[in-house]
Amino acid sequence: MVNLVLVSHSPSLVSGVAELARAMTQQSRVVIATAAGTGDPLHPLGTNAEKIHRAIEAAYSEDGVLVLMDLGSAIMSAEMALEFLPEEQRPNVLLCAAPMIEGSIAAAVQASLGGTLQQVAAEAMGALAAKTEGLSHIQQAVPAGTPVTDLTAAQTLLLTIENKLGLHARPAALFVQTAARFTAEIQIARATNEAKRVNAKSINAVGSFGVRQNEVIKVFAAGLDAAEALAAFQKLAADKFGERDEAVQPTVEVAPRKTTTVVDGALMGVPASPGYAVGPAVPLHFAEPVVERRAVDDAAAEWARLQVALDVVRGSTRQLRDQVAHSANSYDAAIFDAHLMFLNDPELMDQARQGILGEHVNAEWAWRVVIDKSAAAFEAIDDEYMRQRAADVRDIGRQVLTQLIGQPAAAVMTQPGILVALDLAPSDTARLDRSLVLGICTERGGPTSHSAILARTLGIPAVVGLGPIIMQVTERTPLVIDGQTGQVWTHPTKKLINEYTTRLTEWRDARDRARAASLAPAITQDGITVEVVANIGNPDDARAAITNGAEGVGLLRTEFLFLDRRDAPTENEQFDAYQAIGDVMGTRPVIVRTLDVGGDKPLAYLDLGHEDNPFLGQRAIRLCLNRPDIFKTQLRAILRASAGHNFKIMFPMIADVSEVRRAKALLAEARAELQAEGTPLADRVEVGIMVEIPSAAVMAHAFAAEIDFFSIGTNDLTQYTLAAERGNAAVAHLQDALHPAVLIQIRQTVQAAEAAGKWVGVCGELAGDPLAIPILLGLGVKELSMASGSIPKAKEIIRTLSLPEAKAMAAQVLKLENAEAVRDLLRKRGK
Ligand code: PEP
Ligand code: MG
């Protein structure tokens, strides 16, 4: 029979608990030994390892001993007591993190029934479930983010929120980002109810607080920089949180709709993205991840598991943000900034930590509870726009869950057609295979739902908010959708199909004419041709690049092959993937960047050990040089795929010239091996480095002799120059690559390259920023590599420029003091 040891700081507490536990087990033979107090009459409250050891000896049984303890030093003392035991006894003694009172009672009952040690422990760990369940209605009623601390000596500020949609997702995100810049504790309340305050550093709390247009809020700040914080909020509100009214579309339609309107035989929805589509319906049904509550022994490991999942989702969200930023505009990309803030939200994290470490439940369950609670808080707000934010919370929640469970995160579509879905999350919309999606129809969602915004961004015709009838549509039902009027016809007549096929052709022709202009080279007014190429991650991106007028690939992020899998891809798998991209690009240049993982892109199958600062740790080339097996496999695959194509190889995250030399030596080894094996490969493959670390820019003269080209990764170069982590929304204001500190390094790199007869490109997001393009050309950059969607616009801009003019502008901005000043000046010039 399993016996128990109860450990407490207080002898009276432990004897009370033991008494209660014994009463529950009636006449059973379960031994309940206790150890409490220090044994020091002057300081009696505390724990003593020797006492615990004696209690364990008294309760020892081959079937096992479960030790339950109260808090603090009790844990350490119990661990020490374990060490006093003979080695062969230790496996039979289990320290249990269950809450002492409930856990002891549950464990005693289970032990009296003859349970095994594991069963008794599991019962103890689940002991809080009944209480949590029973009181869940009270916890739901607690408003998200209600602060527990009362701010003393707080300075205050009254603000009227003038934004059309109040403090909705994006202004709320900016509000929280601003709060996070200050050390002061900051809370907000409605002026009409100062007692109900929320933490201003939590997006969850601020967003779900539901502040509407013209409401007056009171900001409370306490701490050294409280005054500065309030001044920053005042400026922010005066600037309407950077929001242009035209950027915010009014909420016309509510979701979910209970009925569907039919006009002239068409279902009436909300026009969400212009264009027309004619084709078969492809209904998409999401399988919500199934989550069960489990008690876990190693809560710390469970917490770490959640952290890894959160990190992965942060990484992919950041990537989506970067992609959308330049194929649409930064305003749309801010959707993902709001998502990142949810992923970093201190309140959500606290609640999840409490669930996992406090209640010893599995990460999936703890996370699901937190997300449900947060989404419910948004759903309870009497404002349609805010209610739609619940979908964002659920989207983020689902992504983390699918990551934890190991399911594919995104919706998949395997045949061309019109996608019919309940609703689409932003991440699903951004990941859709555009070649298959002719159009989108959803039951829910309004024109301001993020999926609608992103459908527009991606140029997919969409009608949303169609009501429940649309979900009755079966696979391959013929559909016609009009993204201009919001009409959707099921089983359309032949006449209607013909009419819309004609309209569709005309619409596509007009779009293609705009794209066609992009197929021509980008030549400045004074006759200089600028190479405009694309950043891609897979063969689909390569096709989109060509359609948009890319003259090649300036950055192939090879990570796509390595992420979301359980082991590293083989040489042949990689060869096939690179060759598929080479086949799309023909003889156009393709710069293949070697593996850039680590940092915010962890690989499940590479144990990098714990790193306090992963962005400063074993990332990219550092990891590759430490793992020549993985690196050489990749180099061999790239070299093999270079046959018949114009491939170049680029090493990321180079800090020191010795790294380039070692990487080149491994490349030479790979080449020699392949040649010895008689494998065909290109005679010469140019080698370049990314300039992403300030040391590479400062020492560009030393690198120039080693390589053929430089490509500036402004995303990381900005991160490392301004010491502002890329995914951290709280320091987003420092992450502007137009900062003169970054521009000066670009100039320095160009000067060193030119002196050695080498060329410089830019492949960070700055390359596709319309404001930055004249500056980069003026600094002497020869190649711009960007998201495909940005290419038509970038070419248009280049065609309006002359090089002397661009040089003069560049010289002028280099003298300015920060990125804000640079942007202000460039905007004024653009007017
Ligand atoms: C960069 O850092 O600018 C870059 C292009 O690389 P990535 O965004 O993939 O880190
Ligand atoms: Mg980088």
Image: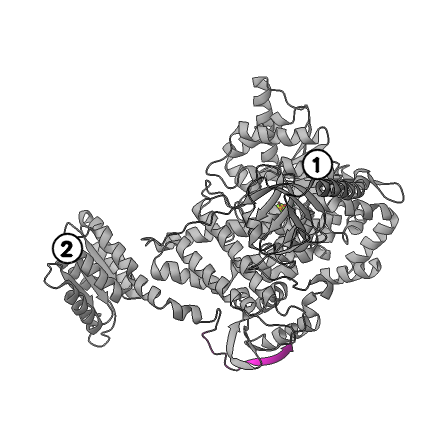
Q: Say whether residue 155 is magenta.
A: yes
Q: Is residue 222 above or below residue 614?
A: below
Asked if residue 682 shows in the view, the reply is yes
Identify the residue shown where x is 61% and y is 30%.
638
Question: Image quarter for residue 36?
Answer: bottom left
Left or right of 363 in this view: 172:
right
Q: Position of residue 385 (x, y in %)?
A: 60, 64
Disc 1 crowd rating (10 Å Cα; few below 14, some 14-19, many 20+) is some
Residue 81 versus residue 767: which sits nearer the camera? 767
Mark 2 Cα within 10 Å, few/some/many (few <14, many 20+)?
Answer: many
Residue corresponding to mark 1: 705
The question of residue 243 being in magenta is answered with no
Assign a secondary structure to mark 2. Answer: loop
Q: Residue at the location (70% across, 73% down)?
A: 238
Q: Position of residue 284 (x, y in %)?
A: 54, 45
Name the one closer to the observer, 44 or 537: 537
Q: Give the residue type that dot 1 points to.
A: Ala
Q: Is residue 126 or residue 581 the one in the foreground? A: 126
Q: Mark 2 points at which residue?
A: 60
398 horizontally vs 755: left or right: left
